[in-house]
Image: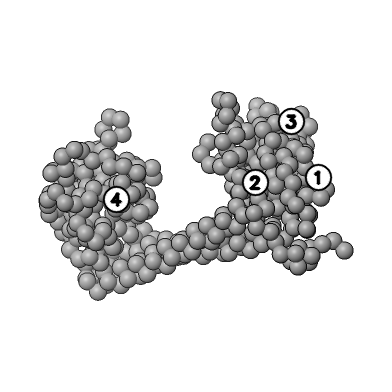
Amino acid sequence: MNKYRRVVLGDIAKISSGGTPSRSNPEYWDGNIPWVKTAQIQNRIINEESVDEWITEEGLHESSAKIISAETILMAMYGQGKTRGQIGILTFDASINQACAAIELKKGVYRDYIYQALLANYSRIRNMSNSGGQANLSATLIKEIPVMLPSFAEQKAIADLLFTWDQAIEKTERLIRAKERQLDAYARNLFDRRNDGKYDGWKVVELKMVLTEHGDKSIGIEEVYSVSVHKGLVNQVEHLGRSFSAANTDNYNRVHFGDIVYTKSPTGDFPLGIVKQSYAVKDVIVSPLYGVFTPKTFNLGIVLDFYFSSPARARNYLFPIVQKGAKNTIAITNKTFLSNTLHLPVDEQAQKEVAEFVSAARKEIDLLKKLADKYKTQKSGLMQKMLTGEWKVKPEIVNQYMEV
């Protein structure tokens, strides 16, 4: 079995980029040539269904755009957030714009191995674009990306092994998406249709009829918590890395297990604030700006948490009663928060049925997410060992990939 040799991408591939036809000329657009941008490059296979713009033959020839063959690796050179440095594999012939680099490999190099090697070096590749004030990647920088290259047969063996983990991750993430769609459909059936009187034990009620502000304050021993869109109530130090609380927290609101907390501060998809139920076993404290309420029953608290987990539903309830101030601040009292109406289960058995369904579905989704994270961690460990030559594929396995 050959030793790994260190090469740079420019030694084993041709690197090129595309271009953008003039937007001012309608003759260049809405043709039949797919035009791929960085938005389609997301560390996965690039399918034609993801393309949202097409150019004409004239647009192709009158610009720097060029046709790239199917099966080519693409890398995003520009882009904020996670985009820059991400890669994908084309499954169809397409044109690309100037923000995309095409990596066309020479003979003797296995595409899927290079794809995995680039995935493994994602953070390092992004850092290359930050050196010397360089905001983006370039063809010159991409050519200098180092790769440890074993024999062709071993490249294939390693790529196939890592692909097994990719399949497990993708299968688990498909299950997560399916479960989330089922839960969303259940929510729409409960809350978004005109169901007044349709369900036994449900009524339109003011929130003040099912939530009570208890007004309990800190007794000096509780941990300070914040509210996260995805994780609910979280320890500030564990979630944010530090505490943002005031030096004196005597006036902070105490939160009991099962309480409903309303943040009254804009966050991402929730510009009118987040509403969450607390599942912290011990009492915790939150900012005095937050509203804290006890639901009539714990199960009703789950129902309310489920309702307000949707940005659209949260807005539907809050928009009529919230006043937006200067600099996007929110002006609403706890009393006003309780003044609007919702169609809710008031019968305890009806509350129990919804709460049990939601809790079971959320638990299943959470377990699947942990499983996907486990697979990703396992794959990351394998990549670190196998793509550097620290671990070798057994000779008898490599021999199965030897060309006859």
Three-letter amino acid code of the residue under disc 1: Lys
Q: Residue at x 60, y 62 (%)?
A: 165
As rendered, which of 215 and 2 lies closer to the eye?
2
Mark seen at residue 341: none
Q: Amino acid at mark 4?
A: Asn
Query: Residues under labels 4 and 2: Cα distance?
Result: 36 Å
Q: Are marks 4 and 3 in contact (CB under 8 Å)?
A: no
The residue singled out by tag 2 in the image is: 118
Tell me the mark number nearer the camera, choosing from 1 and 3: 1
Residue at x 57%, y 38% (from the top left corner) = 126
- Which mark sits nearer the N-terminus, 4 or 1? 1
Q: Kindly indicate whether the residue at mark 3 contacts the one at mark 1 (C-beta within 8 angstroms).
A: no
Q: Is residue 366 above or below residue 267?
A: below
With respect to residue 46, does 173 lie above or below?
below
Q: Residue at x 70, y 52 (%)?
A: 113
Q: CA distance from mark 2 to mark 1?
A: 16 Å
Q: Residues within 10 Å of mark 3 (few under 14, many from 20)?
A: some
In the image, residue 101 above or below residue 155: above
Q: Quadrant of residue 255?
A: bottom left
Q: Earlier in the sequence, mark 1 or mark 3?
A: 3
User: What amino acid is at disc 3?
Assistant: Ser
Q: Dot 2 lies on which element?
A: helix
* Amino acid type for the residue under numbered disc 2: Leu
Mark number, residue 64:
3
Distance in Å between CA atoms under marks 1 and 3 = 23 Å
- Which label belongs to residue 235? 4
Circle 1 sits on which residue? 106
